[in-house]
Image: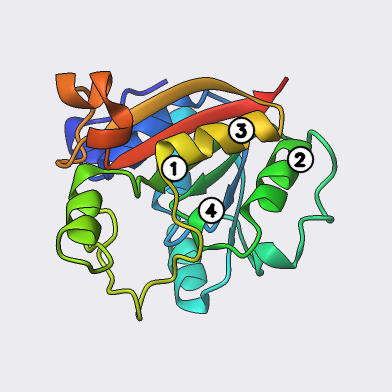
Amino acid sequence: MSQPSSHQASSLRADLRAIVDWIKPGSHLLDLGCGDGALLAYLQREKQITGYGVEIHIAKVNECIDRGVNVIHADIEAGLSEFADNSFDYVVMNQTLQATHYPSDLLGEMLRIGKQGIVTLPNFGHWRCRVQLGLQGKMPVSAALPSAWYETENLHLCSLNDFDRLCADLDLKVLERQVLNHRHARGGMAATLFPNLFGEVALYRVARQ
């Protein structure tokens, strides 16, 4: 298998590069809210995965098609009943779960149709969010939450502690967690020791108990 070039790897955002590290070559994968298909295209080329993306915005669907990605134009909140139980090795939701109306239901569906789920989400417990809300009295705007409150698609923002509790309530096992700091880089002592305070974006790999 060819190794990804440094240019190809650097073309992916840090959170997408972290997801790539978790995916085994030759896997079958479903990407919910796949956007422009950059992650799927990369995985197809570099790890020979098979699978589909699901995307609601037609402009993004067209970008997926241009990249050679198999994509379904659909609203993931309308249900995933067309997918059989355990039909994918991984189901990915990158920066999408917090923008849905019923995150717990969708997380359950992810792990009905996938053996493992990979979720990335912004951390509302990050210290910059706390400062803006606590001292300035306004909804936070940051690199991970770039839109004003009246423009954002996010409906259910949460902290890392909140998501950990949700996984426990749903009896899900957190197999691995990766926390990115304010520069969206992996590692860093502060983010490692105090992830809910210094982690700006979190990635979770989860499975049923």
Q: Are marks 4 and 1 in contact (CB under 8 Å)?
A: no
| Closer to us: 28 or 201 | 201
| In this rendering, the label closer to the viewer, 1 or 3 | 3
| In this rendering, the label closer to the viewer, 2 or 1 | 1
Local SS, label 1: strand
Local SS, label 3: helix
Q: Which residue is mark 3?
A: 167
Q: Are marks 2 and 1 in contact (CB under 8 Å)?
A: no
| Amino acid type, mark 2 | Ile
| Amino acid type, mark 1 | Thr
User: Alpha carbon of mark 2 to alpha carbon of mark 4: how far?
Assistant: 16 Å
Q: Earlier in the sequence, mark 1 or mark 3?
A: 1
Q: Where residue 188 sits: x, y (%)? A: 16, 23
| In this rendering, the label closer to the viewer, 4 or 3 | 3
User: Alpha carbon of mark 4 to alpha carbon of mark 1: how far?
Assistant: 8 Å
Q: Where residue 16 sits: x, y (%)? A: 36, 40
Q: Which residue is mark 4?
A: 97
- Res 208 quadrant in image: top right
Q: Earlier in the sequence, mark 4 or mark 3?
A: 4
